[in-house]
Image: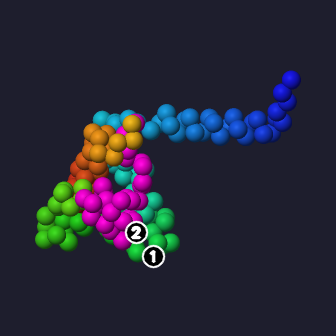
Amino acid sequence: MLRIPTASFTLVLIAGCVAATAWAQTPASPPPGPAGAALFKMYCASCHGTTAKGDGPVAALLRHRPPDLTLLAKRNKGTFDPETVRRVIDGRQPVKGHGGWDMPVWGDAFRGPEGAADGEHVRARIEALVDFLGSIQLK
């Protein structure tokens, strides 16, 4: 008969439940409604802050302070440029602190269920973030 120490078994069971819960809560595509706000909170707010002002809890620890994302349009002569924002989010336009061309800060977070980096799943999440950032621009 196989004997497993109770403490070890309990830790393995807890770790498995936590992993399964996290996996089950990761949507295959953005949920309807405020998907961009939810994605921003999940992936961006730790650095950029919940109000996107660049004051997230991790911001002070970074070498380069995150920018105030509510001022993107203001810094671009009053125009919000969704294509530039898309390129920053998907990693085609490198930004200090986000890594290089091949590594956006969130790594595999936007990859679809099959792991395709360019699938509809990824495009929908990026578009939701772009729409959200466009909606919070200061006038």
Secondary structure of the residue carrying numbered label 2: loop
Where on the picture, by quarter, is residue 17? top right
Can residue 97 be seen by looking at this rendering? yes
Residue shown at 45%/69% (left/top)? 59
Height in image: 118 above or below 102? above
| Residue furthest bottom as drawn | 63
Residue shown at 18%/57% (left/top)? 83
What residue is pinned by disc 1? 63
Q: Identify the magenta region.
A: 87-113
Please say which color scheme the image uses: rainbow
Where on the picture, by quarter, is residue 88? bottom left
Q: Quadrant of the C terminus?
A: bottom left
Across and down, in percent, residue 124 comes to 27, 42
The answer to which of 119 and 95 lies nearer the viewer is 119
Q: In the image, what residue type sits under mark 2?
A: Gly
Can residue 49 be seen by looking at this rendering? no
Residue shown at 60%/39% (left/top)? 18
**Was residue 69 drawn as part of the magenta stretch in this picture?**
no
- Answer whether labels 1 and 2 touch (C-beta < 8 Å): yes
The answer to which of 20 and 72 lies nearer the viewer is 20
Across and down, in percent, residue 2 comes to 84, 27
Q: Quadrant of the N terminus?
A: top right
Residue shown at 46%/72% (left/top)? 62
Alpha-carbon neighbours of circle 2 within 10 Å: few (<14), some, or many (≥20)? few
**Was residue 106 drawn as part of the magenta stretch in this picture?**
yes
Secondary structure of the residue carrying numbered label 1: loop
What residue is pinned by disc 2? 97
Where on the picture, by quarter, is residue 63? bottom left
